Amino acid sequence: MKQLVLLAFFLPIFLLGQNFTDEDYVYLNRHDKISIQLSNGDFKISKEVSEHAKFLTANKLYFANDIIHFDSFSEIKDIEAYTVIADSNKKVKVDYIETKHEFDNGIFYSDQQSKNFTFPAVNKGAETFLNYTIDIKDPHFMDLFRFGTYAPTKHAKLSVEFPENVTLGYITFNTDNVNITLDKKTSENKNIYTWTAEQVSKYQGEENSEDHLYIVPHIITYIKSYKQNGENITVLNDVSDLYKWYNSLIKQIDNKDLDKVYSIAADITKGMKSKREKAETIFNWVQD
């Protein structure tokens, strides 16, 4: 009996914490919807992203700054971003989005880019809305979905719609302490998989700690194979498919016109005899 009384006493406190009322900023809804279409062996993949957040206080207005990452294998379209002011219910649209190239000291060259913008007129009670579409150009890049992020999330959902002749694979990470449900449906020769998570706590990293994906609960979906004319064609069914794909990328490198490269290499290694010394000099030249 005493145990029941104690449970009844602490239960409201637990539920209050799960409602994130003591937070400064919270995601009310985050939803990614992936659509996979297949025609004559060619994939058309798009992802619709929808995010709805709220400023519960005015303590962390820097959350108004947002960023969308993409690269040469994807295209961002139809960005709609706006703020709804609490008192007047007025809708204020984002009027400027800047596209930037991303740089990393550990990477010589990257095709990473980003869309950067700031939600206007944010204050206590303001709600922000972000919607956009990503066209995925290569079926090997299905991307991932984070059930949790740097702010608490009340409702997170990933849905993937794909033809019946396509086999979908998925792997979840760091989800032991998160209640995630998976619903599978079949409709009009299509499969629809939907993962849903409720009340996901925020995740904070520390300086010099591992990447956030070591902690954040997330899922990676990928296309294993598809059937065409009675034949099963693999895409990323196992490691051997990954190797074949990587090898195909190497074959795309243009090795025909390298005279300028050879000329530069010969010039910066002039007078050097050992291969190690030449390699070190070329490496340092590239880094500088």
Image: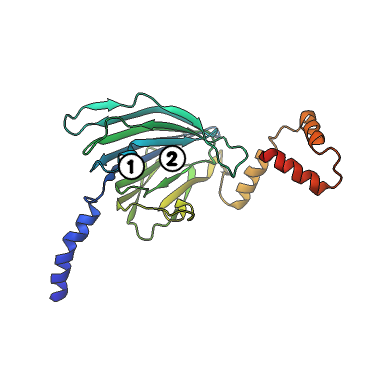
Residue sitting at x 43%, y 50%? 219
- Residue type (three-letter) at the residue carrying disc 1: Arg
Q: Is residue 64 left or right of residue 252?
A: left
Q: Is residue 29 left or right of residue 140?
A: left
Image quarter where the C terminus lies is top right
Residue sitting at x 30%, y 34%? 129
Residue 94: x percent and y percent? 33, 27
Residue sitting at x 65%, y 39%? 249
Characterize the local packing of mark 2: few (<14), some (14-19) or many (20 or more) Cα atoms within 10 angstroms: many
Q: Answer above or below: position of 88 versus 176.
A: above
Q: Which residue is mark 1?
A: 30
- Residue type (three-letter) at the residue carrying disc 2: Phe
Residue 189: x percent and y percent? 41, 39
Which of the marked residues, 1 or 2, is nearer the chain's N terminus? 1
Q: Answer above or below: position of 164 versus 213.
A: above
Q: Which residue is mark 2?
A: 162
Characterize the local packing of mark 1: few (<14), some (14-19) or many (20 or more) Cα atoms within 10 angstroms: many
91 or 34: nearer the viewer: 91
Using the numbered discs, state the Cα–Cα distance from disc 1 to disc 2 in whole angstroms: 21 Å
Image quarter where the N terminus lies is bottom left
In this view, the mark in front (1 or 2): 1
51 or 43: nearer the viewer: 51
